[in-house]
Image (cartoon, rainbow, N blue to C red):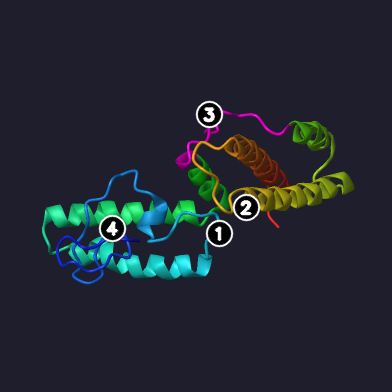
């Protein structure tokens, strides 16, 4: 990220704190997860590097390191630590990451556009019938699980391709990506239902 510490002038890796002098930054509650981790917005995120940054930035903002700095510093550390963990939760999850990108580019939220691609809806009807009629562990049940897993992976690939490179703000393609995200959410819920019905492995 292209920013400097107002206290010492050093370059900042994260919008939460300065790695050089240790001063905590006052960050907006709706801070961009990418800015929190010092990353350029994009769908592709190196999860190993993300974990490395999480550990490094945690050492900068963890409340334990500010216990003797006074109530104000401790409160700021607790807040920034929470923001760091929240940002990690978004960036580490490809669906939440994609949704954040779509919304930041002016695309619709799930509440604003809850529909799914028309072709996908026909398959949903068949899947729902199987979920209602097939018994957990049956051949139909296992085939449905494989089918849903394949669809989940295909949808993820399509979403990643549509967001690489990032569309222009307000682009029409954001509506289609939103619908694909809704479809991915449906598949995730269906797979979760199958896993829950199967019981402990």
The C terminus sits in image quarter:
bottom right
Mark 4 Cα-neighbour bin, 10 Å: few <14, some 14–19, many ≥20: many
Q: Regarding mark 3 in the picture, which secondary structure is present there?
A: loop
Tell me: 93 left or right of 78: right
Question: Dots 1 and 3: beta carbons under 8 Å?
Answer: no
**Residue at the right extreme of this rendering:** 139
Mark 1 Cα-neighbour bin, 10 Å: few <14, some 14–19, many ≥20: some
Question: In terms of sequence position, does the residue under pointer 1 or pointer 3 come before the other?
Answer: 1
**112 within the magenta span:** yes
- Dot label at residue 111: 3
Prevailing secondary structure class for the magenta stretch in the rendered image? loop
The Cα–Cα distance between marks 1 and 2, rounded to whole angstroms, is: 8 Å
- Image coordinates of residue 29 in percent, x first then y, are 31, 44
- Dot label at residue 16: 4
The Cα–Cα distance between marks 3 and 4, rounded to whole angstroms, is: 30 Å
Above or below: residue 79 compared with residue 57: above
Q: Regarding mark 1 in the picture, which secondary structure is present there?
A: loop
Question: In terms of sequence position, does the residue under pointer 1 or pointer 2 come before the other?
Answer: 1
- Image coordinates of residue 104 in percent, x first then y, are 45, 42
Residue highlighted by disc 1: 44
The Cα–Cα distance between marks 4 and 2, rounded to whole angstroms, is: 28 Å
């Amino acid at each position: 990220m292209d920013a400097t510490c107002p206290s010492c002038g050093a370059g900042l890796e994260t919008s939460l704190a300065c790695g050089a002098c240790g001063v905590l930054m006052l960050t907006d509650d709706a801070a961009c997860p990418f800015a929190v981790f010092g990353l350029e917005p994009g769908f592709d995120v190196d999860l190993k590097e993300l974990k490395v940054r999480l550990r490094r930035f945690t050492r900068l903002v963890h409340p334990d390191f500010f216990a003797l700095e006074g109530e104000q510093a401790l409160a700021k550390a607790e807040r920034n630590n929470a923001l760091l963990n929240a940002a990690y939760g978004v960036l580490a999850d490809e669906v939440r990451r994609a949704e954040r990108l779509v919304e930041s580019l002016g695309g619709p939220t799930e509440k604003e556009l809850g529909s799914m691609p028309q072709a996908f809806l026909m398959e949903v009807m068949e899947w729902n019938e199987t979920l209602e009629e097939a018994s957990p562990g049956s051949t139909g049940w296992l085939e449905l699980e494989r089918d849903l897993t394949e669809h989940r992976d295909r949808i993820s690939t399509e979403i990643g391709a549509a967001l690489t490179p990032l569309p222009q703000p307000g682009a029409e393609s954001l509506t289609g990506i939103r619908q694909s995200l809704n479809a991915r959410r449906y598949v995730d819920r269906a797979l979760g239902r199958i896993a829950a019905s199967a019981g402990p492995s």
